[in-house]
Image (tube, helix red, strand yellow):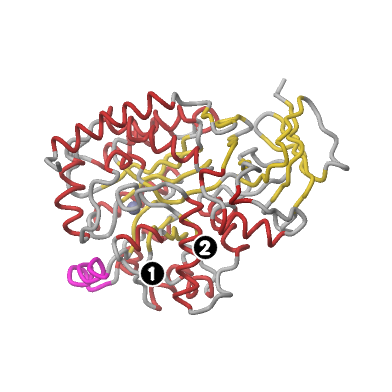
Amino acid sequence: MEKLFTLTNCTVLTVDGQDSIYPDGCIVIEGKRIKRVGPAQSVSPEGERVDLGGALVMPGLINTHTHSHSSVFKNQADDLELMDWLHKAMWPMEKYLSAERAYAATALSCLEYIKGGITTYADQFYFADATARAAQKSGLRSFLAATVFTNPCAETDDTFGAAVKFVQNWKGRQEETRIYPCIGPHAPYSVSGELFGEVARLSWEYGLLVHTHISETLDENRQLRERTGMSPTRWLESLGVLECPVLAAHSIHLDEEDLALYQTYNLRVSYNPVSNLKLVSGVMPMKEMRERGILVTLGTDGAQSNNSMDLLRDLRTGVLLQKMRERDATFCSTREAVRMVTIDGARALGMEHEIGSLEPGKRADLIAFDPESPRLNPLHRNSLNNLLATVTYSACGADVADVMVDGQWVMRSRKVCTLDEAEVRKNAQECSEYLVKHANLS
Ligand SMILES: [Zn+2]
């Protein structure tokens, strides 16, 4: 018998195709899925009743670009130029990573995702196996891309071989693990054409999402042009990579021809505004993308270039930045904003029929906000625009009270149910101290 219960006394922002809202709503959940959702007067509760005390409920947030291992690098490399940031802090610390430390770091990131209302995230890093073990324990839905580099990394000299092994170990077990293996060629400037070709073949063989970084900086474009005579996007096309399902982080410095390729090949974009602001990489051309119908989603990027995994704060920043870029207060509406972190994020991961909105038949991945948070008051429960603006501009991760994935509570009243919070913090502290000491950062 599958567990049957009903969430009552809540305002439901469904993010479905009709933008349905239920000011006094209820959600019946059976096993991992939503059985019914609607107004309290027409949906009869079934099974155990769970009173949410008037909370605003919405689909769980989807973070489409992050590096979970980097939580232990947090606040160690700030106010630096990109190259100094890499050479003086990031790479010296990465050298001392191990599977055990990657596990501790990922557990801390997962703790932060849960506390900020993220139920699904797309990660890219090596030590993917250790990352997956921590992710599985957290109960989150994790799209883990094993990173591929031309150069050796702290884990192995053969990152592609390690990625193949990771995919073979974890593929097809998502009902049990909530882990969805992907492949993560780091970027056009750090992965050879030959290796990109192998990645594309692996993607076809296993049906894998290719999660990469494209045109984050002008310098990257210049380097690629010197080496290949092409922009990063055109070079990837020439290698056949764009024929795979591609999730492209950053995507800042794109010309007309690049944008046309993004459109033709349906590239899925992860907009990373806080990381881009911090490293002064540039501002992503969202308007040009939207005009071409290119799918735009939102990612925090790693803690080394963001310092926080609060997707709601990044949403607010990202929307405001785009309004300023366009000098247009009407650009990027709250409706578009909320979709970026829910249904559009689901689409980018090929999961739009499973997650991203609260509809019968979909998985019960959802969050409930604390109705007592002053940031979220007053709330006009009958107004779609008011609810969307509350999420886009007022809410932050700390306002999330409850988190559910696959019908299972991952957090209740801000207490995480899947991880031992004190132990996760302690392990990450020890790990970070070790890395800082050995990399001679302080
Ligand atoms: Zn990144």
Q: Which residue is mark 2?
A: 295
Near-viewer residue (149 or 409): 409
Near-viewer residue (431 or 151): 431
What residue appears at the point 65 percent right and 49 percent down from the top-left corner?
A: 357
Whole-percent x, y for residue 1 in the image: 72, 20
Q: Earlier in the sequence, mark 2 or mark 1?
A: 1
Whole-percent x, y for residue 12 in the image: 72, 47
Cα separation, mark 2 vs mark 1, equals: 17 Å
List the single residue furthest toward the top.
1
Lateral position of residue 253 relative to residue 82, left or right: right
Q: Name the image quarter holding residue 426.
A: top left
**Circle 2: residue type:** Leu
User: The C terminus lies in which quarter of the figure?
Assistant: top left
Q: Which residue is mark 1?
A: 283
Whole-percent x, y for residue 92 in the image: 15, 44
Disc 2 or disc 1, which is closer to the eye? Answer: 1
Q: Residues within 10 Å of mark 2 (few under 14, many from 20)?
A: many
In the image, residue 227 lies in the stretch drawn in magenta: yes
Q: Residues within 10 Å of mark 1 (few under 14, many from 20)?
A: many
At mark 2, the secondary structure is strand
Q: Is residue 365 above or below residue 386?
A: above
Lateral position of residue 155 relative to residue 38, left or right: left
Residue range highlighted in magenta: 218-230
What residue appears at the point 76 percent right and 28 percent down from the top-left corner?
A: 49
> Which SS type dominates the magenta stretch?
helix
What residue appears at the point 70 percent right and 24 percent down from the top-left corner?
A: 3
Near-viewer residue (159 or 130): 130
List the single residue furthest toward the front.
374
**Circle 1: residue type:** Val
